[in-house]
Amino acid sequence: MEKYFNDAIIGNTKIVASYTKKGELLRLYYQNRDYKQIIDFFNTGLKINDSAIIYLHRDINNMYKQYYEEETNILNTEILNTYFNLRILQTDFASIKENIIVKKYKFTNENTIDLNLNFLIHSGLQTSQNDKTSGRCRNDALMQYNHEYTMCTFAKEKLHSSQINNTTANILEGQIYDKDYIGMSSDSSISYDLGTLKPGETREFEFYIYIDDNKSGLDGLEKTIERIRKIDFRTEYEVAKKYWKKYVKEHNGINLELTDTPKNRKIKEIYIRTILLYPLLINDETGGITAAVEIDENLTKCGGYCYCWPRDAVWMTDAMNTLKMRKEVEKFYKNFCKNTQSKNGMWEQRFYTDGRLAPCWGYQIDETASVIFGIYNHYQITQDKKFLKDNLKMCEKALNFLKKYIIDIFEKTNKFHISYDLWEMHEGINLYSIASIFAANSSMIKIYEELKEEFVKNRVKQENVNKEKEELRKLNVKIKEYILTEFYDKDKKSFIRNLEDRQIDISILGIVEPFEIFMPKEKKIENTVERINMTLRTYTGGYKRFEGDHYMGGNPWVIATLWMVNYYLAIGEKQKAKEGFDYIIKTSTQHGFLAEQINNEAMKPAWVIGLGWSHAMFITTLKKMIEKGILK
């Protein structure tokens, strides 16, 4: 069964977990944000009196309501089983200091008869030929292990029963049993006898999922389990709650003094959820930022999302600066970018957040250009010249690669492998890519000007810098002329996205926002926007990426729609900007997550919930909307 939608996400600095809207644990990552995803499935259920198993996340008689504790990453799922009139409150959160997921259940008998409860857990870990998973049950804990890690599931209570092998054969009956304590099985099960719940009575039950890196041996692991058993749930809960509320307060970079309306409450919810999402996407050690929590590990519909694309991360750092995450931004540039830059100055398509090269199918020149652009943007916020100085050599290496690339295009020498566009679907010469190089050149000129005092004592360096700035200015004149000559279609009266299919694409707006090559009210830009509205705007008000977009059905994208909103803000069309922004608010999830794409008919996410780039553009757009007095 494929698991494409992460409806809710929790975690800490080492663990990230995702859930469905019914409270099913879908994914569990340790030790990085993007590696490894540990579980194949994690099912919980109840045997009530003489029933078969009633799965908490899928039963015809279950009704669901899910919500986060306010301003936290603590998730609550209310489940009402209408057949037995049993009400269940499931609470999930990651401990702040331990490598554990805490799961608490509160059972309330709203029936007129006694309910005997047996709680079952059936979990399967990812396994492969090169890293087999096995099960071991000792000291009232299920330990599922392979060479790299062990996942331990246990409670304070003693186990009622366990089954290491072939659980699937009989668990539907609600009964598990096994003579073996250890076996070569990737899935195993345990159960707890919760006793009899009389009408009106309530019973609470907690268990833990602990992940160990196998470095302490079996004795060390069992000692850790015993130590965790002694941890008080209420204390862990209060620590996590306090931590996240403080985190939100410290990263509240936009003063949201909005009137209390349903729409404004939703805006605030998306805003708060963005603040709480980003630390779950950031590798705390390296500064790498993953695009999203994975939705398609088996690559059945896409090439995967749980990686760090330098360009996507740069867009996100812009929002992170607004959210007072400046240390995280600096770590991304000074640590992650430095460690992942190729010898020739470029960045490959994508990386794991620990800095290792991820699976790629090409490169995108705008990723290299975006890093220089992002570094100067960060400086504009901090005014920290040391930051510029520390990253100068990295920028110069990247700039040399960009110069060779653009000159190769002008001179048509074909020395360079052709680049993909930002959507990774077209190889060739693309307008957005060329525009990003223009912006990188402009940023580099400004970086040199800001650091000019550093070169006063080094006359050779000073002369070289002055020559470089002049060369970059001349190069940008050529780039702008090239864009006007090659990328403006006189028949369409519009800029086009590339020199091959010559289609309309929302990324054309990059020459205005954010790269500022042309003014938003220039006639050719206005003509292009008119063409965009004719070809990319859908009947609901959302915008597609480009003509003929077929990826996942060719839906409107959140970033495409917000790109258009930013254009309207630039020309003072407040009502049109408001309409596009309202579309984003209406199509956000119940928890305030933004998707990559929207299903127009359902007005719900069509793909990738909690996309970092979507949330980034929301934050930057929200800031502008407030500054211009559109939101009140």
Image: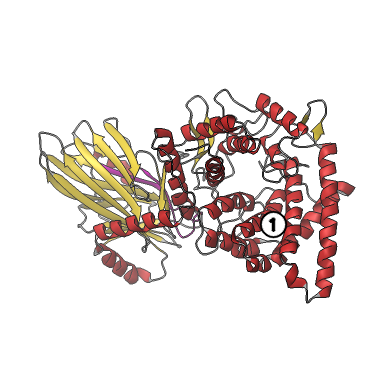
Q: Identify the residue at horizontal 50%, vertical 46% (top origin).
A: 294
Residue underneath mark 1: 372
Q: Foreground: 315 or 259?
A: 259
- Coordinates of residue 395 in the picture (x, y in percent): 71, 61
Res 571 seen here: yes
Q: Foreground: 519 or 246?
A: 519
- For badge 1, the amino acid type reads Ile
Q: Identify the residue at horizontal 62%, vertical 62% (top origin).
A: 383
Residue 54: quarter of image = top left
Residue 484: quarter of image = top right
Q: Identify the residue at horizontal 43%, vertical 44% (top origin).
A: 257
Please state if 477 lies on the left or on the right of 575 as rendered: right
Residue 14: quarter of image = bottom left
Please state if 555 lies on the left or on the right of 185 as rendered: right
- Coordinates of residue 605 in the picture (x, y in percent): 49, 34
For the N terminus, the image quarter is: top left
Please, which colouring scheme is shown?
secondary structure
Instruction: Provide the secondary structure element on which disc 1 rests.
Output: helix
- Coordinates of residue 509 in the picture (x, y in percent): 69, 38
Res 166 seen here: no
Q: Identify the residue at horizontal 75%, vertical 63% (top origin).
A: 448
Q: Foreground: 194 or 530?
A: 530
Is residue 76 on the magenta stretch? Answer: no
Could you classify mark 1 by the number of other residues whose Cα lies within 10 Å: few (under 14), some (14-19), or many (20 or more)? many
Is residue 31 on the magenta stretch? Answer: yes
The boundaries of the magenta stretch are 23-45
Q: Residue furthest bottom?
A: 457
Q: Is residue 20 above or below residue 404?
A: above
